[in-house]
Amino acid sequence: MKKTIAAALTFFALTTGVTMAQGVYSRPYGNRLPQAQGPRYNNDQAQDEYKIDRIDAIVNLSRRQEKQLRKIENSYDQMVANPRMTQEGYRQLMLRKRQDVLAVLTSSQRDRLFAAQQNNRPYNNRAPFGRRG
């Protein structure tokens, strides 16, 4: 009886240790979770919609322009999901995204957007370089 209990406890201890050790290897490569599985996925979609709605409120987008902006947002979200993205690569990707978004707008819409961005900056003419100037 003692041998059976000892064998069962040994078997239990060995199988538990093996299953705990296997958990490390099932994680995806890199520090970030894939975009669709992460908890930020829905939040990211909501932020994209909020950005498009803000641009629409400022410049009056047509339905075609809204669709193009959504398509741009989705394509760049997929590119940013790469876990091996460097800081410089991310910066250049966001610069290209900004250029693509501005290419969708007409010249008068771009002017309205730039004017709205200039009005939202704090200390527009008073202190351009901060407190100490």
Image (spheres, helix red, strand yellow):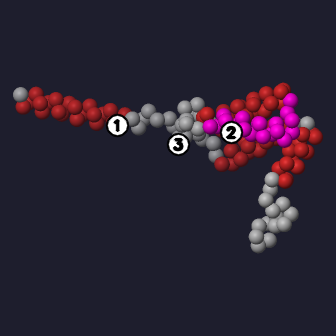
Residue 33: percent from the left, percent from the top?
54, 37
| Residue 44 visible at all | yes
Which percent across, then down, holds residue 104? 85, 34
Distance from the alpha carbon under mark 3 to that under mark 1 = 19 Å
Between 75 and 82, the one nearer to me in the picture: 75
Instruction: State the image coordinates of residue 114 (x, y, percent, origin top left).
Output: 86, 48
Q: Relative to residue 79, is residue 59 drawn left or right?
A: right
Q: Position of residue 5 (x, y in %)?
A: 12, 30
Q: Which residue is the extreme one toward the bottom?
A: 132
Instruction: Indicate yes or no whether the magenta region holds residue 58.
Output: yes
Magenta segment: 43-62
Say if residue 79 shows up in the picture: no
From the viewer's side, name the closer residue of 24 and 98.
98
Residue at image x 22%, y 31%?
12
| Three-letter amino acid code at the position of disc 1 | Ala
Amino acid type indicated by mark 2: Gln
Q: Nearer the viewer, mark 2 or mark 1?
A: 2
| First of labels 2, 1 by sequence position | 1
Sequence order check: which comes first, mark 3 or mark 1?
1
Judge from the rendering whether residue 120 lies leftward or rightward of residue 86; answer left or right: right
Residue that lies at the very extreme toward the front in this rendered image: 57
Residue at the disc numbered 3: 31
The answer to whether 52 is drawn above or below residue 92 in the figure is: above
Question: Residue 21 got which mark?
Answer: 1
Report crowding for label 1: few under 14, some 14 to 19, many 20 or more residues within 10 A (C-alpha). few
Residue shown at 59% from the left, 38% from the top: 40
Instruction: Say the numbered circle drawn on residue 47.
Output: 2
Residue at the image point whose x is 64% and y is 37% from the top = 44
* Quarter the N terminus occupies: top left
Q: Earlier in the sequence, mark 3 or mark 2?
A: 3
Tag 3 and tag 1, C-beta contact below 8 Å: no
